[in-house]
Image (tube, helix red, strand yellow):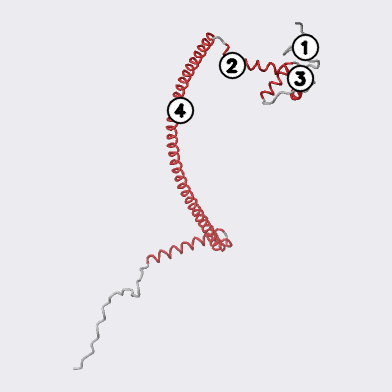
C-alpha cells in the first residue's frame, strides 16, 4: 500500500506552517506531566502558532501512541524470557553486593580518618591547653612585674617631689642669704665711705698717717684695758698695811 504524500508519518510529518509531530508530542507530554489534559487549544497556546486543523490530527496520533508507550514501562519486564531475567537479577544482586562492599570500605576508611582526626584534635587541644596555661603564667608574671614597676615609679616620684621641695627651699635660703650678704656689703661700703671721707679731703699721705695714728691709739687702749685688773662687785682695791704711829702719852703730874 502506497501512502499518500499528504499523509505525514508519525514523528516526522511537518505541516505547511512548520509544526511537526515531535513538537506536538513534546508539548503534550509536558502538559500531561503537569497534570493537564492536552487539547488543541492548550498546545496551540504553548507553541504560539499553528492552526487547529494541523494540530488536531497530530494530537490524535499522540493519543494512539500513548497506550503503547505505557505498555513499554515496568510491566514490559514480564515479557522478558526467564533465563534472561535470572541473569539480569544475578547481575543486579552482584552489583548490589559490590556496592555494599564498596560502601563498607568507604565507611571503614571514613571511620579511620575520623579516628585520626579525633586524635589530632585531642592532641591539638592538649597542646593548646598547655600553651594557654603557659600564657596565663606569663600574664600573671607580667602583671606582678608591672605592679612592682609601678610601685618603684611611685616611690621615685615621691623622692623626686621631695628633692624638688628641698631644692626649692635651698634656693629660697640661698636667695635670702644672698640678699643679706648684699645688704651687709652695702652697709659696709656705706660705713667705709662715711669714715673715709675726712681723710680724702685732707690729702693722701696725711690722711693715711692720721688713720695709722688712730689705729695705733686704738691698739694701745685695748692693751691698757687688758692689763688693768678687773674689780668684781663693789669691792675696794686692797690697801697696804701701815704701822700705826705711837700714841703720845700725856705727862703725869707728880
Neighbourhood count class around disc 2 (C-alpha, 10 Å): few under 14, some 14–19, many 20 upward: few
Which residue is identified by label 2? 75
**Between discs 1 and 3, the one toward the N terminus:** 1
Disc 1 to disc 3: CB gap under 8 Å: no
Q: Closer to the camera, 22 or 210? A: 22
Dot label at residue 238? none
Disc 3 to disc 4: CB gap under 8 Å: no
Neighbourhood count class around disc 1 (C-alpha, 10 Å): few under 14, some 14–19, many 20 upward: few
Which residue is identified by label 4? 121
Which residue is identified by label 3? 56
**Between discs 1 and 4, the one toward the N terminus:** 1
CA distance for labels 3 and 4: 71 Å
Q: Quadrant of residue 42?
A: top right
Placement of the C terminus among the 4 image quadrants: bottom left
Mark 3 or mark 4: which is in front?
3
Work out whether 30 lies above or below 229. Answer: above
Disc 3 to disc 2: CB gap under 8 Å: no
Neighbourhood count class around disc 4 (C-alpha, 10 Å): few under 14, some 14–19, many 20 upward: few
**Between discs 3 and 2, the one toward the N terminus:** 3
Name the side, left or right, on which 124 lies relative to 9: left
Name the side, left or right, on which 18 lies relative to 197: right
CA distance for labels 1 and 4: 76 Å
Amino acid at each position: 500500500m502506497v501512502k499518500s504524500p499528504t499523509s505525514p508519518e508519525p514523528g516526522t510529518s511537518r505541516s505547511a506552517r512548520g509544526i511537526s509531530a515531535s513538537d506536538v508530542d513534546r508539548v503534550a507530554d509536558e502538559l500531561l506531566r503537569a497534570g493537564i489534559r492536552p487539547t488543541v487549544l492548550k498546545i496551540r497556546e504553548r507553541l504560539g502558532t499553528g492552526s487547529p486543523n494541523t494540530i488536531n490530527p497530530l494530537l490524535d496520533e499522540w493519543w494512539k501512541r500513548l497506550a503503547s508507550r505505557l505498555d513499554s514501562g515496568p510491566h514490559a519486564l514480564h515479557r522478558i524470557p526467564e533465563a534472561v531475567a535470572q541473569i539480569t537479577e544475578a547481575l543486579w544482586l552482584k552489583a548490589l553486593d559490590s556496592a555494599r562492599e564498596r560502601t563498607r570500605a568507604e565507611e571503614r576508611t571514613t571511620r579511620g580518618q575520623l579516628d585520626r582526626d579525633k586524635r589530632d584534635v585531642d592532641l591539638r587541644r592538649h597542646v593548646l591547653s598547655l600553651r594557654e596555661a603557659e600564657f596565663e603564667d606569663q600574664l600573671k608574671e607580667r602583671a606582678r612585674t608591672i605592679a612592682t614597676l609601678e610601685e618603684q615609679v611611685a616611690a621615685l616620684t615621691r623622692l623626686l617631689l621631695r628633692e624638688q621641695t628641698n631644692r626649692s627651699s635651698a634656693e629660697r635660703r640661698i636667695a635670702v642669704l644672698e640678699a643679706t650678704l648684699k645688704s651687709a656689703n652695702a652697709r659696709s661700703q656705706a660705713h667705709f665711705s662715711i669714715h673715709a671721707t675726712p681723710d680724702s679731703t685732707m690729702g693722701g699721705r696725711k690722711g693715711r698717717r692720721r688713720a695709722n695714728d688712730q689705729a695705733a691709739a686704738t691698739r694701745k687702749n685695748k692693751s691698757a684695758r687688758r692689763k688693768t685688773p678687773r674689780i668684781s662687785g663693789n669691792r675696794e682695791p686692797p690697801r697696804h698695811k701701815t704701822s700705826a704711829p705711837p700714841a703720845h702719852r700725856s705727862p703725869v703730874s707728880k
